[in-house]
């Protein structure tokens, strides 16, 4: 983007990675303000370096529950007006306004931030579903509008991110004023890619959001595979592929979250050979079909969409992930201390195995595993379902 290079204020080409992740879902649907997620993320401040932080919130726009909400960023007002004209030609815009924000001394040269509540006009959809049309338009905007991009595009959710430490980004967007039943967050320590507003986490598409700690060494082949399916990577970071791959596997190919996790963090071939014959067939089929979406390298992610949150680490657990439960709320984090900070009365905690997904769903009480199951057995149950 036009302003990306100017935001790498420390002129770093590569720094050692840490990154802090935190998220929770209240499966009862009760809403919580942003203070909890900000406090948890700020407790892991040393995991970032001020070059990126962000938050995703679900259930925060009940008055526009049935409309898609585009959170957009622009290098200046002229670029915003250019995109504004385009959006009004291709969508029915019901309401738009600046995303509420305030001046924060630590944040230098922030972009223009705006939100649009809209829905597609049938005349422009040309045989596409609403969701496919939204994906197509977001890809087009982010590829062709220099100086503007769409940060999030789902219903009743939004992503708030930028260049700064967690508390500065939270103050900029006034995160404490929002109410949501599910929050995810990220404190960034960039590797290989610049610290700029578009490259901060979370990344989103439709109501998907993903935050990531680590480095995807298979990014090239992952990117080529999803771009063959109509997605376009424009944010100059390996994390972006997770959001698009999740949309492809779960929404378009109708795979359960457990199966998507088995694609991203599949067991080694040597492990598959020790499984039962039936389990071998399942995993071989997944590897043969989706082998180019296997995410090699160290990573943990928190992947979310409306009503669901999943924490997942790489298959040999090179990045930290912990989970905890109190009542109907599931927490996942890079550090156990952040969970205890915001929930001192936590009832159960555990450390998931590599490749073992931790999934919370709205309306279903979370449960800690009585004992760690082998991931292939969890996946086999998902196939049967």
Image: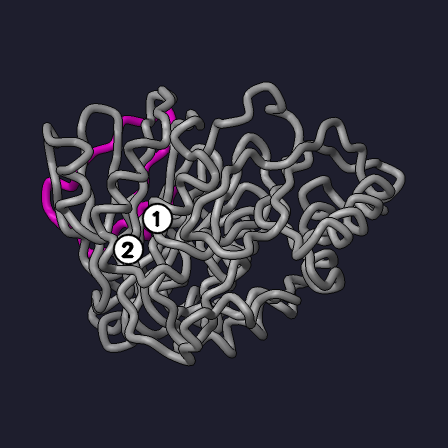
Image quadrant where residue 211 sits? bottom left
Instruction: Tell me where residue 313 appears, x and y as whole percent.
Output: 28, 59
Q: Where are the magenta residues, as a range?
A: 359-385
Measure how far apart labels 2 and 1 are at the Cα level: 10 Å
Q: Residue furthest right?
A: 123
The residue at which mark 1 appears reads as 166
Q: Is residue 75 above or below residue 172?
A: below
Q: In the image, residue 375 lies at what x, y percent?
A: 25, 56
Q: Quadrant of residue 115?
A: top right
Return the residue nearer the eye: 56 or 189: 189
- For the point 44% across and 55% down, the residue is 201
| Quarter of the image that includes the N terminus | bottom right
Identify the element where label 1 is drawn: helix
Indicate yes or no whether the magenta region holds residue 17: no
In which quadrant will I find the C terminus? top left
Numbered mark located on residue 209 in the image? none
Q: Which mark is residue 20?
A: 2
> Which residue is at a point 57% across and 71% down the rendered structure image?
225
């Amino acid at each position: 983007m036009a302003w990306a290079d100017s935001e790498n204020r420390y002129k770093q080409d590569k720094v050692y990675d840490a990154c802090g992740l935190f998220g929770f879902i209240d499966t009862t649907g009760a809403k919580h303000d942003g203070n909890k997620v900000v406090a948890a993320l700020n407790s892991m401040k040393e995991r970032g370096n001020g070059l990126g932080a962000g938050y995703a919130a679900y259930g925060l726009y009940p008055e526009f529950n049935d409309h898609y909400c585009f959170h957009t960023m622009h290098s200046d007002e002229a670029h915003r007006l250019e995109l504004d004209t385009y959006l009004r030609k291709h969508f029915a815009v019901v309401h738009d306004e600046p995303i509420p924000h305030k001046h924060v001394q630590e944040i230098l040269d922030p972009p223009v931030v705006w939100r649009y509540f809209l829905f597609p006009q049938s005349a422009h959809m040309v045989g596409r579903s609403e969701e496919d049309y939204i994906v197509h338009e977001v890809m087009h905007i982010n590829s062709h509008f220099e100086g503007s991009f769409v940060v999030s595009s789902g219903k009743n959710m939004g992503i708030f991110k930028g260049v700064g430490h967690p508390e500065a980004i939270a103050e900029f967007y006034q995160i404490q004023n929002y109410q949501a039943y599910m929050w995810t967050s990220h404190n960034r320590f960039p590797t290989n890619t610049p610290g700029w507003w578009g490259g901060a986490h979370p990344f989103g598409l439709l109501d998907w959001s993903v935050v990531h700690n680590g480095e995807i060494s298979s990014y090239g082949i992952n990117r080529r595979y999803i771009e063959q399916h109509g997605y376009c990577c424009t944010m100059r970071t390996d994390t972006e592929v997770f959001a698009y791959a999740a949309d492809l596997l779960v929404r378009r190919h109708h795979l359960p979250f457990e199966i998507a996790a088995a694609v991203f963090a599949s067991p080694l071939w040597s492990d598959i050979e020790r499984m039962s014959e039936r389990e071998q067939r399942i995993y071989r089929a997944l590897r043969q079909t989706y082998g180019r979406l296997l995410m090699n390298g160290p990573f943990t992610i928190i992947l979310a969409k409306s009503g669901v949150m999943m924490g997942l680490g790489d298959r040999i657990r090179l990045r930290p992930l912990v989970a905890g439960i109190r009542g109907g709320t599931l927490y996942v984090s890079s550090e156990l201390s952040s969970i205890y900070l915001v929930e001192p009365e936590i009832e159960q905690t555990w450390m998931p195995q590599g490749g073992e997904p931790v999934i919370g769903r709205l309306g279903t009480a979370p449960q800690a595993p009585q004992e760690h199951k082998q991931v292939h057995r969890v996946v086999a149950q998902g196939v049967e379902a």
